[in-house]
Every structure is written in structure tokens, then in C-alpha cells.
């Protein structure tokens, strides 16, 4: 499995994805609790992927 397309994504895109996941998680919190947790974990993952990408490109 190749993740070469992820190398071209900017850190800002990952941060934006995490914000979208957090907002969607808070909107659907009352309807489906399991999807809420999935979006929270996905938002945290996107945030840390953005941080890691930022640290790698700064050097």
C-alpha cells in the first residue's frame, strides 16, 4: 500500500481536517455516540499527522 499522495499534503490540510472532524463530532454527538468517538479519534489522528508533517518539513 503506497501513501505517496500523503507526502504532498500540507500540514494546514491536516489541521483543517481535524477541525472538520471535531465540528462534525460535536454536531452528531446526540444522534450516534459511536460515530462521535470515531470522529474524535480521526480528528486527533489528523492533528498529530499535521504536527508530524510540520516537524519533518521544518528541517
Image (cartoon, rainbow, N blue to C red):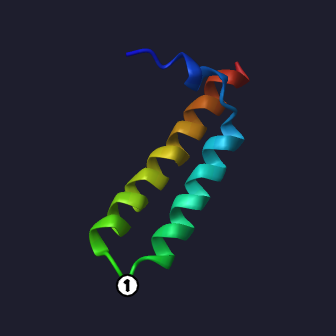
Q: Is residue 48 above or below residue 24?
A: above
Question: What crowding class fits label 1: few (fewer than 14 Cα within 10 Å), some (14-19), or many (20 or more)?
Answer: few
Marks counted in the figure total: 1
Residue 36 lies in quadrant: bottom left
Q: Position of residue 21 (x, y in %)?
A: 52, 59
Q: Is residue 46 above or below residue 41?
A: above
**Residue under pointer 1:** 30
Q: Position of residue 4 (x, y in %)?
A: 54, 16
Report the front residue among 55 and 6.
Answer: 6
Instruction: Tell me the residue at 59%/50% (across/down).
Output: 17
Task: Name the side, left or right, on which 31 lies relative to 43.
Answer: left
Residue 38 lies in quadrant: bottom left
Q: Position of residue 41 (x, y in %)?
A: 38, 55
Report the front residue among 55 and 10.
Answer: 10
Q: Quadrant of the C terminus?
A: top right
Instruction: Tell me the residue at 35%/81% (across/down).
Output: 31
Instruction: Tell me the residue at 32%/75% (across/down).
Output: 32
Report the front residue among 1 and 43.
Answer: 1
- Helix, strand or loop status at disc 1: loop
Of all residues shown, which one is farthest toward the left? 34
Amino acid at each position: 500500500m503506497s501513501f505517496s499522495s500523503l507526502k504532498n499534503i500540507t500540514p494546514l490540510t491536516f489541521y483543517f481536517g481535524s477541525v472538520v472532524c471535531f465540528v462534525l463530532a460535536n454536531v452528531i454527538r446526540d444522534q450516534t455516540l459511536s460515530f462521535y468517538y470515531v470522529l474524535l479519534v480521526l480528528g486527533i489522528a489528523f492533528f498529530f499527522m499535521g504536527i508530524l508533517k510540520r516537524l519533518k518539513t521544518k528541517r
